Image (spheres, helix red, strand yellow):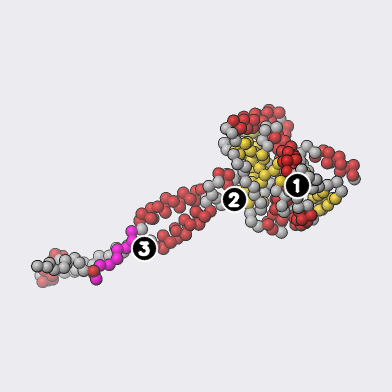
Amino acid sequence: MRRKAAVVVSRKLGSTFEPRPPKPKIKDLNITSLIDILTILLVFMLKNISMDAVEKNAPEGMLLPTTITKDKLIKTGLTVNVKIYPDKILYGTDNIKIGTLDEFMTKNEVRSSLLKLLRLEAKRITDDGNIPSLLIQGDRDLDCRYITEFINFSASASFANIYFSTIHTDNLNEVLGL
Amino acid sequence: MAHPPSKSRNLQKKHPRPLNLIPIMNLFIVVIPMLMMIMVSVHLALIEIALPAAAEKKIEQEDQEEPPPRIILALLPDKFEILVGEDEEYTIPVKDVSDIFAKYDYNELNERMSELKTEYNEQNTIDILPDPSVKYDILLKSIDICKFNGFPAIKYLTSTRKIFRAKQKGGA
């Protein structure tokens, strides 16, 4: 009001001042559409989320085989995870490097250190009242000789329950190669 | 004396307040990155196998009567070989030798396993015997096909490998 009055006064006085243009009103940001998108995203992610600890541990740099069936871990079973890459063997969740596959097949030190680790872990699991299980995550290009040897080896370390880790699919044709 | 209505009480002039979406936006900004971090894009599965000693104990407990014939699936570099009991033997040769992953006829194996399940409905176990040079992928696909056709118990044969080879050579 004051400004208007001032302008009027100035016009009366013959001044060259012009009235200021009205300030544009700041509109509120319309975030409704953004909320819609985020709600859809949230629902999608909640659907896909898995609370299964095993499903989160897909090993990096390893091509797992694909299967249509899947089994459940036995009750009171605790797994020890072993990752067998074409060039190395990693033990446990800490990915302790045991050695290469050739070393595992030939070197006695490598085998004895792995056997010691497996036996200790199996004893710890059994002492807690659980059943030791071995989860083998192997690259699909491995020869079965290594898997067979590893199964024999882990059986001698009191692991009776052995699981292979695979990628699950619902498409049978993918498994059949059609 | 009644008071006149308040000047501020003019319902016609009142506009609905815009919903304050800022708190829910804050929530989304926290929750969505967290979910993106822990979202599983690849679903892993577990395939259980049994060692011969453990599987035999189970079979002894389950089957008191005459057991169904033992089914052995041998994975050889050039064929699948299915031995049913002492007599029956099926061979599924490879389709294409040039490609290392596509050569095995999984479709034929699937059909054969389905037939075996129909014939020996009481049998739930398959003994699997992979050749050392066969790829792990082929082993797991074969196990998967067996399980899919109603053979949930897979017995991984390791110690009888040499016996099987000797038997093969003797048969040939």
On the image, numbered disc 2 is attached to which residue?
Answer: B43
User: Can you see residue A117?
Assistant: no
Disc 3 versus disc 1: nearer the observer: 1
Say above or below: B27 vs A15: above
Report crowding for label 1: few under 14, some 14 to 19, many 20 or more residues within 10 A (C-alpha): many
Chain of the residue on which disc 2 is drawn? B
Local secondary structure at mark 3:
loop
User: Which residue is labeled 3 in the image?
Assistant: A30
Instruction: Say few, some or many: other residues with alpha carbon within 10 Å of mark 3 (under 14 / 14 to 19 / 20 or more).
Output: few
- Say whether mark 3 and mark 2 are on the same chain: no
Whole-angstrom CA distance, mark 1 to mark 2, is: 26 Å
- What is the CA distance from the residue labelled 2 to the residue labelled 3? 38 Å
Measure how far apart labels 3 and 1 are at the Cα level. Answer: 63 Å
Asked if the residue at tag 1 contacts the one at tag 3, i.e. Cβ–Cβ closer than 8 Å, the answer is no
**Residue designated by label 1:** B126
Query: x and y percent of residue A172 in the render?
Result: 68, 57
